[in-house]
Image: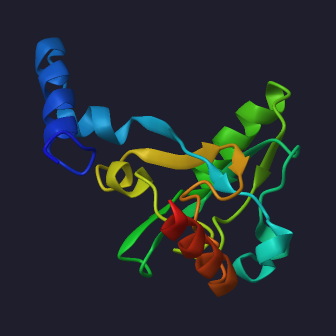
Amino acid sequence: GNTGLKSAFYKYFINDLCDKEGLSLRDVLSKSKCLSADVSAAYDPTYAGNYEKANSAYFNHGVALMKYTGTRGKGSTSDASAEFMAEVKTFLKENNILWQVCELGKVEEAGGGTVAMYLANLNIDVVDMGIPAVSYTHLRAHETPEHLVCRLLLEKKK
């Protein structure tokens, strides 16, 4: 829509703020830093094929930092710089905040894209950070054919 982060609204809004302060939009955006708050896909052993165990987020291991997120190769992605990742990790360590680095999981099955790429396209340093969650995208995201048949039969009875 015309007010989402993918629209020009965000850029226009920041530009209006810059104009009032006599600042350059380009300077403000390129000096901005963002923690894009989103959930990450926690490792789910029930659907282990959707995860790379060594690169997954786990419950009770702290907030999850996702350096690289997105879908469809490099076309719809965000890849945080090493310098910004180091800055964020240093902040978390210095403030005794438990954290872990992870991947979202198998795209479109265990995780997906975030808004980070839209901010990165504006030259803003951005990294996704959030809590690990299981089956957060859709209640029926991991249905097997057997589950689907049972659900359809139950819905038919209503």
Note whether 89 is above or below 65 in the view shown.
above
Give the farthest residue toward the front. 157
Q: Residue at x 29, y 49 (%)?
A: 122
Residue 106 image position (x, y, % from top left): 62, 77
- Front residue (pair 10, 88): 10
**Image point (43%, 67%), residue name:** 77
Looking at the image, residue 121 sits to the left or right of residue 90; the answer is: left
Would residue 69 be seen by someone viewing this image from the given angle?
Answer: no
Q: Quadrant of residue 29?
A: top left
| Colouring used for the render | rainbow
Given residues 58 and 139, the one toward you in this image is 139
119 vs 96: above or below: below
| Image side of residue 62 versus residue 114, left or right | right
Q: Is residue 138 above or below residue 147?
A: above
Q: Position of residue 70 (x, y in %)?
A: 47, 67
Going by the image, does 30 lie left or right of 83?
A: left
Name the image quarter holding residue 55. Answer: bottom right
In depth, the one of 16 and 27 nearer the eye is 16
Seen from this angle, which residue lies furthest top?
21
Closest to the observer: 101 or 7?
Answer: 7
Identify the residue at horizontal 82%, vertical 73% (top origin). Answer: 46
Residue 110 location, x and y as percent? 63, 69
Left or right position of 62 against 13? right
Q: Can residue 49 be seen by looking at this rendering?
A: yes
Q: Where residue 64 sits: x, y (%)?
A: 71, 49
Q: How many marks?
A: 0
